[in-house]
Structures are given as C-alpha cells and as structure tokens.
Image (tube, helix red, strand yellow):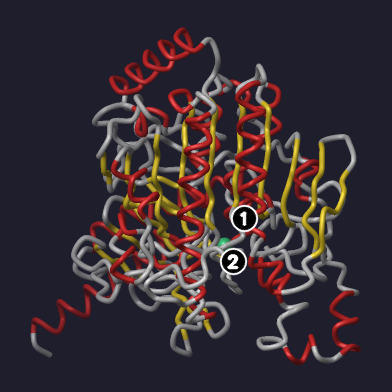
C-alpha cells in the first residue's frame, strides 16, 4: 500500500467518524462552534448576532417616528403565491423572461433588496410560520393542507398568532386573499386573530379543478367524480368573515373566468380597506396574499396578452405587479405611506411541476424542494423615508423573522411567548438601519418532518438529499436519501446552483456546522414538536 493511500483511507475513516459523532449523536446538547458569532439570550429563542450600535439607531428612529406620527407604524405584507426568485426584474427576470415588473422593481430601488431571503418549501408551512414565528415542524403544519385532510387536532388551538398579539397591541388586523392554513371553524383567519378576512381558503388549483375541463376532464366531465370531489368538503367561495361575527360566502368560483378575476376583486377590497383603516384611529396590520401566480393561472380580461410572453403565467405576473403598484398608491393616497412598513415576498419557489404555468428560479430545484430553488425567494423591504433607497444585502433573512420584526415595530416584543420555541429573530435594525447587518446566522431547512439542510454564511450543509427523478417534477417525482460518507456541503458563492459538494475539502467546517446542527436539534428535546396528523 502506498503511503498516500494510507493517508486517504485514514482521512475517510476520520470523516466517517466525524459524521457519526458530530451530526447524528444520540444525545444532542445545545452547543455552538468556532464559526458562530450568535448569542443565545434565552432557551426558547433563536440565537441572534447582537448588533448593539444599529439596534440603538433603529430604536431611536422608531421613537422619533412615534413622536412624529403619534401612532405605531402600519405593517403591510404583500405575499405572492409561488413567484420564483427569477421572476421580478430586480432579481434578473422581468423583461428578460417576458413579463415586466416595473412596480416591484421600483419598490426594490426605493428600498432594501434581499438576496438571501428564505421561505419554507411549500405554501401552508410558510403561511403558518410567518404568523407564529415557528418552524412548521413545531406547529405541526408541515405540508399543505389538502381537500379531504382530516387533522387530529387544531394546530391553532394553542398557538399565539401574530394578528392576536398585534390586536392586543392596539392594531386592526386584516387578511385579504389566500389563506391555506385550514378552513374548519377554529382554523380560519377570523378565528385565529384577524379582525377581518376577505379571500379564499385554498389555492387556485384547488378551485380550478372543479371547473377546468381542459386540465381536469376526468373530474369536470364526470358528474360522479365531481360529486366525489365536492364531498371532500373544500370551500370554493370568496369568503368574508369577521372575528367573533358572521362569515358569509360572497360568490362561488363557477368557471375559469371567475378565477381569472379573483385577484382583481381582492385588490379592490384591499384598496378600499386601506382608505378605511388609515382614517380609523388604530395602526393596522394588513396581509395581502395574492391567489396568483400559483397554478392554474387564467389571465384576467384586463391583462390577457399584456405580457411580452403572452403565456397565462406571465400575464399573471404583470397583473400582480400592477396591483402591487395600486396597493402602494392607495397607501400613499391615504396619507400613511411614511408610517407604513411594507414587505414584498413569495411564499415558496416556483412550482415547476406545472410548467409552463410556472415562474423561474436560477437555482437548483423548485417549490417542494430544500434546494435553493424551493426556498430562496424575493424579499423587498420598503418604507419611505425610513429605509434608505437602493440598499441591497445578501445577509440571511428568514420569512419567520417577520413575526418578531412586526412585533418589535408595534412595540410589543414583550408579548413574544417564552413557553415555546420561537425560530424568528427581530430583524428591525437590519431592515431599517443604514448599513444594518442581519442578526440571523443560520437558516434551517426542513421538508415536512425531516431536517434536510442548514445555511450558515455562504455555506449550505445537507444531512439528507432530495433528488428529482423526473426532470422538473420537484414535488411529484422525488426521492429522499441519506447522505453517504460525507454530508454534502456547498459554497453558494462559487456554486450557487449546488452542483459541486466540497465537504471533504472543508472538513473543519463539517465539524463546526455539525455542532450548529446539533444545537438546533437540541431545541426539539426541550420543546417537543406537535403532531397534528399531517406527518411529523
Ligand atoms: Ca405557494
């Protein structure tokens, strides 16, 4: 045996031992590695990188605004469904992919454009995580709730939602648009803390499969099957509900033409509501959740053929972009733009399974995937006069951070629960301080009940790998594997498409990141996850 072979055999053995002891121990303890700069300030909160100077600057700025306006700031989230990282022009899409996005681009130019903003891989997990500040595996909302799903327990029964906490802090709270986090009584937006809900419980596809005979002929053209589908009990209505009050169906989606106009109706509601909310005394939290651009997209009359591409998906991007412009204009017309924090994002990567009715991502994978294409989404923070125009940052932001950040803006940080683990981090100072740095050091990427990967700095470590067995079928044809001798480690700066793992080359990082992985795992020992019957 040559000496060199002996060395490499030893290295391989050492690496295997490292993998066994560092990444998959039987008793994990919270620990941090030489890589970490974060501080754990309480057992129930995610360690944060403390930034005292910018935190002081942000606190002073918020205090000055409160004096100027005599009111806490309004909070507006614009949540697009399934929009790809590569769809907005300000992220390299726009006219380059046949759908101009002048309004999104304007917000980015006038605010802060985030390039490492992370969602969960699918709708329900993201939508529940941003309202609880908690990973889906903790709340049990680990995958989309589908028609016919029978949940063992109501996950909301013991969660403390953002609208509940903001309501206690004196905010009016409204959700306009898509919900997709449960439609049984007790799980609807108007039951979990929102004062008012105007929108649809499921995603567009759940609605169009009742009426689109071209895509679903086996359902729509077969009365018996259609009756079976109806008996799964999903709502097909535009719903208007009030906290503690009546919930009424405004209209049913009876055709693809109805579906095409849904976002227009939601936008009309939101624009009117903004005028009302601005006149009323309270600050407000408004989540406007678009139905588009989730498949199946049907062009509304006003936008058909308006994209250069002419494809329904692209017309939908142009429509959503126009409505973003109208909603921001409504906030300005109501005279409250200078006291309103706006955040624009997407709830997951593009749903490539429905190509060509899908967006674009430059990264590996797509919706449903733990690869960057599934979870790295556009993230634009805009606040006129507060966030300096033209800022850009690649530092880490997890959409769950919106939970803590919104409560901080409302002066209600003290209401963040301490009897359960909160994965969100207050990023107020990152977003509003000039030259602000992220207080987040790591993003943990879960797929249903499995901890798949962790991003830290420009590195991403995979404990498990999900491969796609048919091209672009990132949801419908995938297999989950354990990694082999080495966990897979990518450097996203030199390999943004995650094609060339460098774990063996960077084995000091494997040990350190393994310790960080263990620290995250240990939080589940102290705060056990909830199983609601969706798969844990
Ligand atoms: Ca989605």
Residue indicated by mark 2: 300
Circle 1 Cα neighbour tier, 10 Å, few/some/many (<14 / 14–19 / ≥20): some
Q: Is residue 16 left or right of residue 341?
A: left
Would you say 93 lies left or right of 10 here? right
Task: Tell me the residue that label 1 is attached to.
Answer: 264
Where is residue 286 drawn, in percent x and y? Answer: 61, 37
The verdict on label 1 being within 8 Å of ligand 1 is: no
- Can residue 487 be seen? no
- Do the CB atoms of the residues marked 2 and 1 lie less than 8 Å apart? yes
536 w.r.t. 408: above or below: below
In this orientation, does residue 191 appear? Answer: yes
Q: Count of labels shown?
A: 2
As measured in the structure, the alpha-carbon distance from the residue carrying label 2 to the one carrying label 1 is: 8 Å
Q: Residue at x 60, y 72 (%)?
A: 298
Q: Earlier in the sequence, mark 2 or mark 1?
A: 1
Q: Position of residue 29 (x, y in %)?
A: 49, 46
Q: 10 Å neighbourhood of mark 2: few (<14), some, or many (≥20)?
A: many
The x and y percentages for residue 150 are 84, 65
Looking at the picture, tell me which residue is in the foreground, 111 or 373: 111
């Amino acid at each position: 045996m040559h000496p060199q072979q002996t060395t490499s055999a030893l290295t391989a053995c050492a690496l295997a031992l490292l993998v066994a002891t560092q990444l998959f121990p039987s008793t994990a303890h919270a620990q941090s590695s030489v890589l970490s700069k974060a501080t754990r300030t309480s057992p129930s909160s995610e360690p944060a990188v403390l930034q005292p100077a910018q935190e002081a600057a942000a606190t002073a700025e918020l205090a000055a605004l409160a004096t100027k306006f005599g009111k806490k700031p309004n909070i507006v989230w614009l949540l697009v469904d399934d929009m790809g990282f590569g769809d907005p022009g300000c992220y390299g899409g726009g006219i380059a992919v046949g759908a101009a996005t002048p309004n999104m681009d304007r917000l980015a130019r006038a605010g802060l454009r985030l390039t490492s903003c992370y969602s969960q891989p699918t709708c329900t997990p993201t939508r529940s995580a941003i309202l609880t500040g908690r990973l889906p595996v903790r709340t049990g909302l680990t995958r989309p709730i589908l028609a016919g799903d029978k949940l063992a327990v109501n996950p909301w029964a013991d969660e403390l939602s953002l609208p509940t906490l903001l309501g206690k802090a004196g905010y009016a709270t409204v959700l306009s648009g898509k919900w997709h986090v449960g439609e049984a009584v007790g799980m609807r937006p108007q039951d979990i803390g929102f004062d008012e809900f105007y929108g649809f419980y499921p995603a567009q596809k759940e609605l169009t499969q009742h009426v689109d005979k071209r895509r679903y002929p086996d359902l729509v053209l077969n009365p018996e099957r259609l009756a079976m589908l109806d008996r799964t009990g999903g709502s097909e209505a535009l719903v208007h509900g009030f906290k503690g009050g009546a919930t009424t169906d405004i209209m049913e989606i009876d055709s693809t033409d109805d579906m095409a106009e849904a976002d227009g109706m939601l936008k009309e509601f939101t624009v009117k509501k903004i005028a009302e909310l601005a006149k009323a005394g309270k600050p407000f939290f408004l989540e406007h959740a678009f139905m588009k651009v989730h498949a199946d997209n049907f062009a509304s009359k006003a936008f058909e053929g308006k994209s250069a591409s002419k494809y329904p998906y692209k017309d939908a991007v142009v429509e959503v972009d126009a409505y973003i412009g109208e909603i921001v204009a409504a906030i300005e017309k109501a005279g409250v733009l200078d006291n309103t924090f706006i955040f624009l994002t997407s709830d997951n990567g593009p749903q490539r399974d429905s190509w060509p009715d899908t967006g674009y991502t430059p990264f590996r994978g797509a919706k449903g995937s733990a690869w960057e294409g599934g979870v790295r989404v556009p993230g634009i923070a805009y606040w006129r006069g507060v966030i300096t125009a033209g800022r850009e940052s690649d530092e880490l932001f997890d959409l769950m951070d919106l939970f803590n950040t919104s409560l901080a803006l409302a002066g209600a940080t003290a209401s963040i629960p301490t009897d359960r683990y909160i994965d969100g981090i207050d990023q107020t100072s990152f977003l509003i301080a000039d030259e602000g740095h992220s207080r987040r050091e790591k993003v943990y990427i879960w797929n249903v009940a499995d901890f798949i990967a962790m991003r830290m700095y420009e590195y991403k470590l995979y404990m498990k790998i999900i491969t796609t067995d048919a091209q672009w079928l990132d949801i419908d044809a995938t297999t989950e594997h354990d990694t082999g001798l080495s966990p897979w480690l990518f450097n996203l700066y030199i390999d943004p498409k995650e094609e060339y793992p460098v774990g063996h080359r960077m084995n000091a990082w494997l040990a350190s990141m393994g310790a960080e992985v263990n620290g995250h795992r240990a939080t589940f020992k102290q705060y056990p996850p909830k199983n609601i019957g969706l798969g844990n």
